[in-house]
Amino acid sequence: MAVEATAPGKAILFGEHGVVYRGPAVVLAIDRRARVVASERADGRVFFDALDLGFSGYFEGETYVPVYGQPWRGKNLQPLLVSARKTMEHIGADSGMDIKVRSEIPIAAGLGSSAAICVATVASVGELLGGSLTPDEICELAYEGEKVVHGTPSGVDNNISTFGGVLRYERGVGIERFELDGALPFIIGNSKRKRSTRRLVERVRRLREREPELVDRIIEAIAQVSQDGLAALKSLDLPRVGDLMNVNHGLLASLGVSIAKLDIMVHLSRGAGAYGAKLTGAGGGGCMIALSDESNLENIRRALLRCRGEPHIVGITYEGVRTRRID
Ligand code: MEV
């Protein structure tokens, strides 16, 4: 018997980086999912097949033994190992495990692929071992895996992957989940430059140490934009959502987390008729997001291709983590 779990990736519409300190982030679950299938194995090993990502191998204790791919890939598997082990610890079980990972979410691109994989790992292992985990438990256990990748992330990524939909997330306050009246056309542009969330969060932290008052004012402004952006989104006031996305991009750039290619993609999208465009996620590469009328999507898609970005037209999904038994 095996259990398959899937969980969605995300795009942050407002509030990234600010949310690490204070104020809300507004996050959309996108219709690109990570898929994990877990089944028990008798030899006590935890075996990972992540061939889509270019590697497979197993852990004996803490030692990674590669079967396919480079030995250092064991580092990429640490968050999954931690997610699986914490889940077993939580439900008081200990078992060898085959864990197969597949994902439609581009990795290291700011679209929450690591959180989606951690959430799906916890859910599949938990269900396989009869743990009947609640969504809150799945979210908390996945956060343990996320900490291995990102240091001390705000928790926004594991929350959106667990619950799906549109979330207001604020550290220490929790989540508010809501549904929008109607589909919003978003387009995501991948700069195809990989980057590390941990390093970018660290960069903002160092800038804040050097310029505490200035950076706190920027963080305050991001919190305000995020709060106003949420209100505009709820009332489907798209021109205002767009204006606030543009302001949010400027504030993120002032924190030093944009790059020239993201700036170009953002400006070309606006020029091609988007209501607004901004980088999404940690920045430093990764993706930008634009909001547009249906009629301008194709123009924006072409503009992104012109500057060698990779466009993805995405929808919001209201389906959070899901599990199903496979016999
Ligand atoms: C990363 O998806 C979002 C950041 O705000 C980091 C975090 O919230 O942990 C940059």
Image: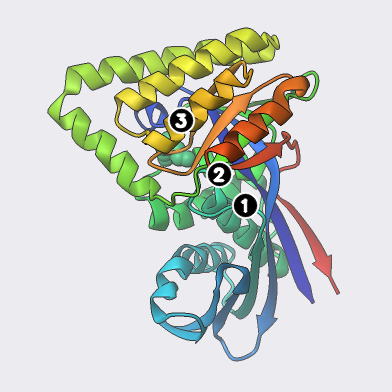
Q: Nearer the viewer, residue 294 or 27?
A: 294
Q: Are the residues flagged by discs 1 and 2 in contact, CB closer than 8 Å?
A: yes
Q: CA distance from mark 2 to mark 3?
A: 19 Å
Residue displayed at 34% across by 34% down: 257
Whole-percent x and y of residue 274? 62, 19
Residue displayed at 42% across by 43% down: 285
Q: Residue furthest front?
A: 306
Whole-percent x and y of residue 190? 54, 43
Look at discs 1 and 3 and give the one toward the viewer: 3
Look at discs 2 and 3 and give the one toward the viewer: 3
Which label belongs to residue 327?
none
Q: Which residue is mark 2?
A: 111
Q: Secondary structure at mark 3?
A: helix
Amino acid on which the number 3 mark rests in the picture: Ile
Question: Does 20 sit above or below residue 254?
Answer: below
Residue displayed at 50% across by 27% down: 266
Q: Which residue is mark 1?
A: 105
Whole-percent x and y of residue 272? 62, 21
Whole-percent x and y of residue 315? 73, 35
Q: Nearer the viewer, residue 284 or 171?
A: 284
Q: Which residue is mark 3?
A: 264
Q: Are the residues flagged by discs 2 and 3 in contact, CB closer than 8 Å?
A: no
Amino acid on which the number 2 mark rests in the picture: Leu
Q: CA distance from mark 1 to mark 3?
A: 23 Å
